[in-house]
Amino acid sequence: MKALVIYSHPCPESYNAALRDTVVSSLESTGYEVRLLDLYAMGFDPVMSAEERRLYHEQGINEEPVDAHLDHLFWCDTLVFVYPTWWFGLPAMLKGWLERVFIPHRTFRVPTATETMEGRLQHVSKIAVITTCGATWWLSKMIGEPGRKTLLRGIRALCAPRCKTLYMAHYKMDTSTPESRRTYLGKVQKRLASF
Amino acid sequence: MRVLVVFAHPVETSFQAALHQRVVDALAAAGHDIDDCDLYREGFNPVLSRDERLNYHDLTRNRDPVAPYVDRVLAADALVLVYPVWNFGFPAIMKGFFDRVFLPGVSFRMQDGKVVPALHNIRKLSAVATYGGAWWRAFLVGDPPRKCVTRVLRAVVKPGAPIGYLAHYDMNRSTADSRARFLDRVTTAMHAF
């Protein structure tokens, strides 16, 4: 069991950092080998450049700018995303990681007149999302949770057909209390122990 | 109307660039006053920094890092977004525009821990999007970028504001003909905007 944890928050002192630490230690005590990508700390550039876009469909060449990230992606069998939900979606930093790393040929087959899209991350059998939301549960549902769907439907479509998913969110962060935050950390630990 | 056009594609020769040009020309022909915000050309940085996050709720300082963009959003009467859908979402550069510019005191205010939408100067909203995948695939995924426009932004702008969403799906299998038809559709919609 190999888990790649992708974490995206600008503040090392944030609650999301505490979530990240809980996620990593829970996975490790469950028996996972863990690699952590702290996108802010590593100064990841989420903006796909004009050059990258021009070479987007060039098999092999399109892998060069994100070589190391692809190695991590093909090393793991489990993806775990830890981030704050901003505007009901992923932080730009995390969104850019998806668009620059999940590139054609290596991670999916581009549909043509005769062939449909085919996911090429068949080795990924689990995806977990651990997030925080300013909004309430019901408002998130009414809006339709675009961030959750980008990951657990969009990215999942590239993974193993029976890829297992887990989604956890602490809602109403703006009125959260030390207790509610502690409780959520406990829940995350518990759920990951059986993931 | 003063229309803020927000555009996100890095390549000048792309179909998206043609769409962007068509949107700007058609809106101008219809007599609108246009503020053309080409995020790539302006070198917009979509990454919300640690300082920005720490000052996020401080209404006296939170606009400082993006003040010109805040002014442009507040000066507009309408918003038109032009973008390719990448990995079932806005391009990062556009997502970051909302992360960094749609701040407390700009597009909403906090009242007793609750968000109250406040971008009521925007009286009309439209999106022009291209999708790599087929319509049915976007539908199955839940079409996150469409929801960001028709639900998230709808909730923020003036209540009852008309919202348009124009999309060309299945770009990977598009033809010269399907692209020309979509350009025409966009032109018609922008003439009537």
Image (tube, grey):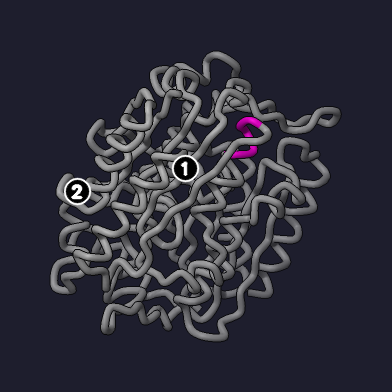
In the rendered structure, the answer to whether residue B53 lies left or right of residue A141 reads left
**What percent of the width, then of the height, locates residue A49?**
43, 33
Residue farthest toward the right in the current orientation of the protein: A114
Residue A158 magenta-highlighted: yes
Locate residue A7: give its quadrant: top left
Determine the main secondary structure of the stretch shown in magenta. Answer: helix
Q: Amino acid at mark 1?
A: Ala
Residue visible at 24% across and 64% down in the picture: B67
Is residue B63 at all visible to an observer of this figure? no
Chain under disc 1: A
The quadrant in which the C terminus of chain B is found is bottom right
**What percent of the width, then of the height, locates residue B134?**
75, 45
Q: Are marks 2 and 1 on the same chain?
A: yes
In the rendered structure, the answer to whether residue A138 lies left or right of residue A28 reads right
Residue nearer the viewer, B6 or A142: A142
Residue receiving disc 1: A128
Residue receiving disc 2: A11
Residue nearer the viewer, B142 or B3: B142
Q: Which residues are magenta?
A: A156-160
Depicted B111 relative to depicted B64: above or below: below
Q: Amino acid at mark 2?
A: Cys
- Whether the residues at callouts 2 and 1 have beta carbons within 8 Å, the answer is no
Instruction: Estimate the spatial distance between the alpha carbons at disc 2 and disc 1, rounded to whole Å.
Output: 22 Å
Residue visible at 21% across and 57% down in the picture: B53
Residue depth check, mark 2 versus mark 1: number of the one nearer the observer: 1
Residue A93 magenta-highlighted: no
